[in-house]
Image (spheres, rainbow, N blue to C red):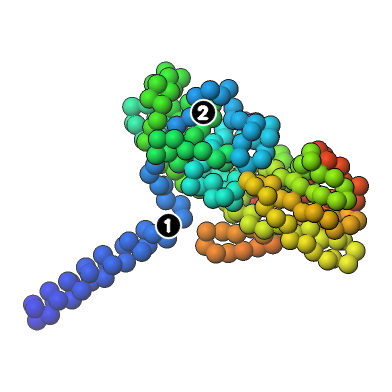
């Protein structure tokens, strides 16, 4: 009887050890250890020439709490994603850290993030502590994907300055919300609903030659880490006489 009990306990322990790594591997809210630096020659905010193609919007979005990413850039799919980043030196760093938006691509000394100076300093407990982590240049961090939220803004389309109606249309998507990636974009004619899949030119820039005519309905495919995919159709259309450089409010937010 005692031998049988030992065998059962041993089997239970083995099953627990086999299950624990699998559960940990599927944790979508866990922090990941890495390193972060900051733009040494920038102003407090981000850069206007980031690889996502946001332009000046990429420097000021989220109050300037932005970052370049290395592997998390993901060929532009990671543009607009939000991450909670906190440094791990308990002497200088706060538990909350800072939430940043990916607006650029870049890497430093084994870093996943190159933060704006503003965002980098906001990981610290105090302004004096911020001076200390600035002096370090690179700090150990932990990060996790979080939902982007812009309560006072709907998702907005910014038409690229090089666009030429009706021959060429390019745009970026501002105020990307939620915690899913935009992995595909379609433009559809509102009258007969013929749709055209756009190309990701680079970063967050979507383009097409010979765009559909008339007022245009936009469709965005939202993809989650769990494999869930949903097409989002904005309330407002892009007008037929769209202009290069113009912005158009889609009328939707993602909670």
Identify the residue shown where x is 12% and y is 80%: 4
For residue 39, the mark is: 2
Identify the residue shown where x is 21% and y is 68%: 13
Q: Which element type, helix, strand or loop, lies under badge 1?
A: loop
Label 1, residues with CA under 10 Å away: few <14, some 14-19, many ≥20: few
Label 2, residues with CA under 10 Å away: few <14, some 14-19, many ≥20: many
Callout in the foreground (1, 2) = 2
In the image shown, does 10 or 238 lie closer to the viewer? 238
**Quick check: marks 1 and 2 in contact, CB under 8 Å?**
no
Specify the farthest residue to the left.
2
Name the N-terminal-most of marks 1 and 2: 1
From this viewpoint, is residue 197 visible? yes
Q: Is residue 42 left or right of residue 202?
A: left
Rendered location of residue 2, percent (x, y): 8, 77
User: What is the distance, in whole Å, between disc 1 and disc 2 at their CAs?
Assistant: 31 Å
92 w.r.t. 170: above or below:
above
Number of disc labels: 2
Q: Is residue 16 left or right of residue 151?
A: left
Rendered location of residue 50, percent (x, y): 61, 36
Rendered location of residue 27, percent (x, y): 42, 57
Identify the residue shown where x is 50% and y is 24%: 40
Q: Which element type, helix, strand or loop, lies under badge 2?
A: loop
Give the quadrant of the N terminus.
Answer: bottom left
Q: Is residue 32 left or right of residue 12?
A: right
169 w.r.t. 127: above or below:
below
For residue 184, the mark is: none
From this viewpoint, is residue 129 visible? no
Q: Which residue is mark 1?
A: 27
In the image shown, does 147 or 167 lie closer to the viewer? 167
Rendered location of residue 6, percent (x, y): 12, 74
Identify the residue shown where x is 76% and y is 47%: 170
């Amino acid at each position: 009887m005692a031998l049988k009990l030992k065998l059962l306990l041993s089997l239970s322990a083995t099953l627990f050890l086999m299950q624990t790594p699998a559960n940990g591997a599927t944790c979508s809210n866990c922090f990941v250890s890495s390193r972060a630096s900051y733009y040494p020659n920038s102003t407090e905010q981000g850069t206007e020439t980031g690889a996502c193609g946001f332009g000046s919007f990429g420097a000021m979005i989220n109050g300037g709490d932005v970052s370049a990413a290395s592997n998390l850039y993901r060929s532009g799919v990671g543009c607009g994603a939000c991450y909670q980043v906190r440094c791990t030196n308990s002497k200088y760093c706060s538990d909350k850290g800072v939430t940043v938006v990916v607006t650029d691509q870049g890497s430093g000394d084994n870093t996943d993030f190159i933060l704006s100076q503003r965002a980098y300093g906001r990981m610290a407990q105090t302004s004096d502590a911020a001076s200390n982590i600035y002096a370090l240049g690179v700090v150990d961090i932990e990060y996790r994907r979080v939902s982007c939220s812009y309560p006072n803004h709907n998702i907005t389309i910014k038409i690229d300055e090089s666009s030429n109606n009706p021959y060429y249309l390019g745009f970026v998507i501002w105020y990307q919300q939620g915690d899913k990636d935009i992995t595909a974009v379609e433009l559809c004619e509102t009258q007969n609903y013929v749709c055209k899949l756009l190309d990701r030119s680079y970063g967050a820039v979507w383009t097409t030659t010979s765009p559909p005519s008339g007022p245009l309905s936009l469709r965005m495919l939202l993809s989650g880490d769990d494999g869930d995919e949903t097409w989002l159709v904005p309330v407002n259309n892009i007008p037929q006489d769209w202009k290069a450089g113009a912005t158009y409010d889609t009328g939707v937010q993602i909670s």
